[in-house]
């Protein structure tokens, strides 16, 4: 018998799922990454540090994503909102003579004053008004533990960044297989007047195949990831 699936519903005015970001430019993928989802589960569990052994148990397990947008008055899928760009100045306005404020000013890797001063411009990108159903496969006992953790999280839950606060309960039950999980997602989407626009399958199928470096091997101070192949299928 195949393992069941835990259904997560990720909905918020803003979401951001970093994939290939640098300090000055924090991009977002079009859909939740596996590392982002697993990180969300670690927050619910209150699990910090490397978590290498726990992460290894989830590396090969299936994860499917279905993306939804709002429907218009005629029942058609509304066009997706463009990525929102948020402009930040990091380290601006702090007194470098104050020992505490100086800690908030960016430094070089050696801890020295950065070239051109401490203030740095950054751009951060967000998905707008999206909802995602995520079906994650696992042993029933482990999924039950995650379900309980998501219902009573140890740390705050957010969808990619701390300003991406979910507007719906994230955990939506444990289901016998991915078909039942996604059927529940369709029911929830219908109640919210949302329509599917694409889905993401783990593995290679007929569709747009991508290589993502989003399978977490180690969290903590020195994060490590490995690649995963996924297929994006457009609805309609």
Image (cartoon, rainbow, N blue to C red):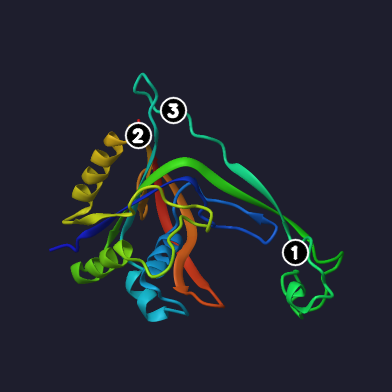
Give the Cα distance between marks 1 and 3.
Answer: 39 Å
Indicate which label's residue lies in the foreground, 1 or 3.
1
| Image quadrant where one finds the N terminus | bottom left
Q: According to the image, label 3 marks what residue? A: 78
Position of 176 with respect to 186 (left or right) is left
Say if residue 234 shows up in the picture.
no
Task: Determine whether, in the image, residue 228 is placed left or right of residue 186.
Answer: right
- The label on residue 91 is 1
How dense is the environment of label 2, judged by Cα within 10 Å: few (below 14), some, or many (20 and up)? many
Residue at 44 percent across and 49 percent down: it is 209
> Mark 1 or mark 3: which comes first in sequence?
3
Q: Quadrant of the C terminus?
A: top left
Tally the marks. 3
Name the one closer to the observer, 196 or 202: 196
**Helix, strand or loop at disc 1?**
loop
Q: Is residue 68 left or right of residue 180?
A: right
1 sits left or right of 72 in the view: left
Report the disc number at residue 178.
Answer: none
| Mark earlier in primary sequence (2, 1) | 1
Q: Nearer the viewer, residue 101 or 17?
A: 101
Q: Residue at x 34, y 54 (%)?
A: 170
Residue where numbered disc 2 is placed: 194
Q: Determine the residue positioned at 75% across, 69% down.
A: 105
């Amino acid at each position: 018998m195949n393992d069941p699936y835990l259904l997560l519903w990720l909905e918020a005015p803003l979401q951001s799922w970093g994939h290939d970001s640098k300090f000055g430019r924090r991009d977002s993928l079009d859909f939740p990454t596996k590392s982002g989802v697993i990180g969300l589960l670690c927050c619910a569990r209150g699990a910090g540090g490397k978590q290498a052994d726990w992460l290894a148990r989830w590396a090969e397990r299936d994860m499917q994503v279905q993306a939804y947008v709002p429907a218009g008055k005629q029942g058609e899928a509304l066009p997706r909102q463009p990525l929102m760009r948020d402009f930040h100045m990091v380290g601006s306005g702090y007194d470098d003579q104050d020992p505490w404020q100086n800690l908030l000013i960016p430094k070089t890797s050696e801890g020295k004053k950065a070239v051109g001063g401490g203030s740095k411009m950054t751009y951060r990108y967000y998905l707008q008004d999206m909802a995602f159903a995520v079906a994650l496969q696992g042993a029933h006992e482990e999924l039950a533990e995650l379900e309980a953790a998501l219902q009573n999280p140890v740390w705050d839950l957010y969808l990619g960044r701390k300003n991406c606060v979910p507007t719906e309960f994230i955990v939506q039950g444990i289901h016998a297989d991915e078909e039942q999980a996604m059927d529940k997602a369709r029911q929830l989407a219908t109640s919210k007047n949302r329509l599917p626009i694409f889905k993401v399958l783990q593995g290679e199928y007929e569709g747009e195949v991508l290589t993502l470096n989003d399978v977490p091997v180690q969290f903590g101070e020195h994060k490590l990831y490995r690649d995963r192949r996924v297929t994006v299928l457009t609805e309609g």
